[in-house]
């Protein structure tokens, strides 16, 4: 579970980083999202974006419950919503408000990428260390969608991809915690691990 949550958090962090030198402004859109390992799809759902927020709803093979994550760039938090009407909160992995920011000690090397689902891209290789382990992942930023990441493939040829992107305004309540949800704390020990910024 922790590994999957970190993978989703990393993807949302990358997906929310846009090209240019101004604070990230996300396009209004919805899309299908898939978690892949090679040619196999082991998770699928929907992602929604609007200005400074993202919402991902994901069903993953082998897990009895779907995952819903809301990232708020303006508040620098991510909420994990549970089916039992509870939610957990953690800081975002790193500061999305600064465009193209990567954690200290990480590198990002970009070059022109291929066209994906009709979207011209920049292809960037990001390298760094997370949890004491060297990490390398390749992301494709859609030039016509404010530079959001529409494909993120890392170790073992695993990652996430967006498909069937539809540009349209999204309802504001998608990016808020429902009024009847109760906040709970992360399991003992997990909170500290998940709050750590990559080094």
Image (tube, grey):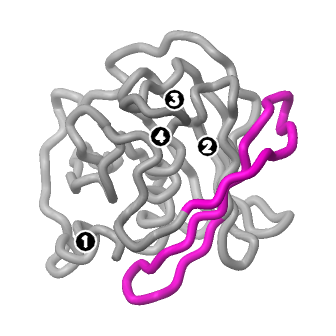
Q: Residues within 10 Å of mark 3 (few under 14, many from 20)?
A: many
Q: Residues within 10 Å of mark 4 (few under 14, many from 20)?
A: many
Asked if the residue at tag 3 contacts the one at tag 2, i.e. Cβ–Cβ closer than 8 Å, the answer is no
Going from N to C along the chain, the mark reached first, 2 or 4, is: 4
If the image is split into quadrants, where does the N terminus sit?
A: bottom left
Q: Is residue 115 magenta?
A: yes
Q: CA distance from mark 1 to mark 2?
A: 23 Å
User: Looking at the image, which residue is at 51% across and 10% down?
Assistant: 169
Going from N to C along the chain, the mark reached first, 1 or 2, is: 2
Asked if the residue at tag 3 contacts the one at tag 4, i.e. Cβ–Cβ closer than 8 Å, the answer is no
Indicate whether 148 appears above or below 8.
above
Q: Quadrant of residue 54?
A: top left
Q: Quadrant of residue 198?
A: bottom left
Q: Residues within 10 Å of mark 2 (few under 14, many from 20)?
A: many
Going from N to C along the chain, the mark reached first, 1 or 4, is: 4
Q: Which residue is mark 2?
A: 149
Residue 153, how many percent across, how many down?
Answer: 69, 62
Q: CA distance from mark 2 to mark 4?
A: 7 Å
User: Looking at the image, which residue is at 75% across and 71% down?
Assistant: 157
Asked if the residue at tag 1 contacts the one at tag 3, i.e. Cβ–Cβ closer than 8 Å, the answer is no
What numbered label is drawn on residue 16? 4
Residue 122, how many percent across, how many down?
Answer: 72, 43
What SS does tag 2 mark? strand
Indicate whether 114 appears above or below 168.
below
Q: Nearer the viewer, residue 12 or 121?
A: 121
Q: Which residue is mark 3?
A: 48
Asked if the residue at tag 4 contacts the one at tag 2, i.e. Cβ–Cβ closer than 8 Å, the answer is yes
Q: Which residue is mark 1?
A: 196
């Amino acid at each position: 579970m922790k590994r999957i949550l970190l993978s989703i958090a990393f993807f949302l962090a990358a997906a929310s980083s846009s090209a240019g030198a101004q604070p990230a402004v996300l396009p209004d859109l919805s899309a299908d999202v898939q978690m892949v390992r090679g040619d196999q799809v082991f998770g699928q759902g929907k992602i929604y974006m609007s200005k400074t927020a993202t919402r991902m709803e994901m069903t993953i093979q082998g897990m009895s419950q779907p995952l819903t994550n809301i990232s708020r760039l303006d508040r620098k938090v991510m909420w994990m919503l549970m089916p039992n009407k509870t939610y957990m909160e953690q800081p975002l992995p790193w500061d999305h408000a600064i465009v193209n920011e990567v954690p200290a000690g990480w590198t990002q090397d970009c070059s022109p990428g291929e066209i994906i689902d009709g979207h011209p891209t920049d292809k960037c290789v990001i390298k760094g260390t997370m949890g004491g382990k060297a990490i390398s992942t390749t992301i494709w930023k859609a030039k016509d969608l404010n530079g959001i990441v529409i494909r993120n493939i890392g170790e073992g040829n695993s990652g996430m991809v967006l498909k069937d992107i539809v540009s349209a305004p999204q309802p504001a309540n998608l990016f808020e915690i429902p009024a009847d949800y109760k906040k709970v704390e992360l399991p003992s020990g997990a909170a500290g691990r998940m709050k750590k910024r990559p080094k």
